Amino acid sequence: MIDLHTHCYHSHDSKTPPRAMIERAIGLGLEYIALTDHYDLDMLGWECIHQLDLDKHFEELTTLKQEYSDRIQLGVGVECGWAKQVEQDYALTLSKYDFDMTINSVHIINGRDCYVQGYYDNLSKNDAYAEYLDVIIQSLNAPYHFDSIGHLGYIMRYAPYDQPLWKLSDYADKFDTILHTLIDKGVALEINTHTKKRPFSFVPTIDLLTRYKELGGELITFGSDAHVPERIGDKLELVSDMLQSLGYKYIFKYLSHKPVAVRL
Ligand SMILES: [Zn+2]
Ligand SMILES: [Zn+2]
C-alpha cells in the first residue's frame, strides 16, 4: 500500500533521517512513500521555525529515490503552508524543482496559529470553523500547482471544544464550494490519520467523503503525516475499509505530479 504524507529531518518538527522512514516503509511492505517536508513561507520570521532548505531536501531525496528504486517507489514532495501574502513566492520557487507531489495545507488562519490553545480564547466553535473553511477556500486559488489538499479539518486536531468534529450540514455551502473546486481543478482530497489522540481517527469527516463521492470526486490520497517511522501507514487499513464501504475503489499515488490509481 501507499503513504503520501510523511516528514523527515528536513522538516522543522522532525528529527528522523529519511533513510529511517524509507526502511520502515519497506519493512511494512509499502509500494510507495512520499516524503513531503514542511515548506512554510507562511511562518517566515517565526523564530521557532527553521526553514526548509529546498536544494538540500530535493537533492538528498532524489538521490535516495534512485538508490531505493528497486525496493520502493519514493515520491519527493513538499507540504506548503498556504498564506495569501506568500503565494507568489511559492509559485516562483516550486517551479524550479521537479517534485512528484505538492500538498497544499493551511496551518495559519489569517496570521494566527490554530495549533496554539490561546487561538480559541473567546472564539466559538462556529466562528472558528467558519473562518478556517473560508481560508481553505482562498487557499484553493493559489497560483501554483498543487496535487492535494492536506488534512482538511486540521483545526479539529487542536480545537478544545467538547464535540470537535464538524457536521457537513453546519457549513454545507462552504463544503460544496471546496469539493466542487477540488473536482474542477483535479486536486486530490487527502485523508490524514494524524489526529493526536483525539476522539476520531482521521480528517476529513465521513459525511464529507460521502458528499465528495456524490459530486463525482474520485481523487483520494492517504497520508499518515508521520514524523517518526513508527507512524508510517498508521490506520491505513481502517481508512481502506471505510473508503470501500463508501463505494470508493481506488486511492492515488503521485509521480511527477501525475495521479496513478492504486486499487483498494
Ligand atoms: Zn500539515
Ligand atoms: Zn504534514
Image (tube, rainbow, N blue to C red):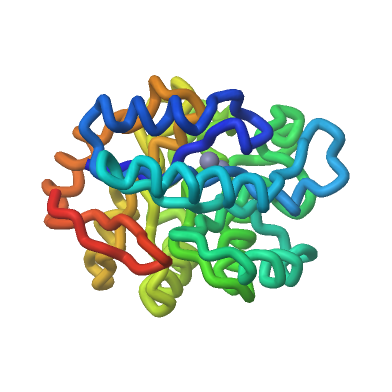
Give the quarter of the image for residue 33. top left
Q: In this view, does 26 lie to the left or right of 230?
A: left
On the image, the x and y values in percent for residue 85 come to 79, 65
Q: Which residue is drawn at 82% across and 48% down?
A: 44
Which sits in the foreground, 80 or 158? 80
On the image, the x and y values in percent for residue 211 come to 29, 61
Does 216 appear above or below 27? below
Does 69 appear above or below 87? above
Q: Residue at x 50, y 53 (%)?
A: 77
Say whether residue 204 is visible.
no
Does 100 appear above or below 43? below
Q: Which residue is drawn at 77% across and 36% down?
A: 49
Does 112 appear above or below 220? above
Say whether residue 28 is visible.
yes
Which sits in the foreground, 53 or 220? 53
Give the quarter of the image for residue 27. top left
User: Which quadrant does the N terminus fall into?
Assistant: top left
Give the quarter of the image for residue 122. top right
On the image, the x and y values in percent for residue 224 come to 39, 36
Which sits in the foreground, 180 or 222? 222
Q: Which residue is drawn at 61% across and 52% down?
A: 106
Q: For the image shown, how many numbered marks are present on the structure? A: 0
On the image, the x and y values in percent for residue 196 come to 48, 24
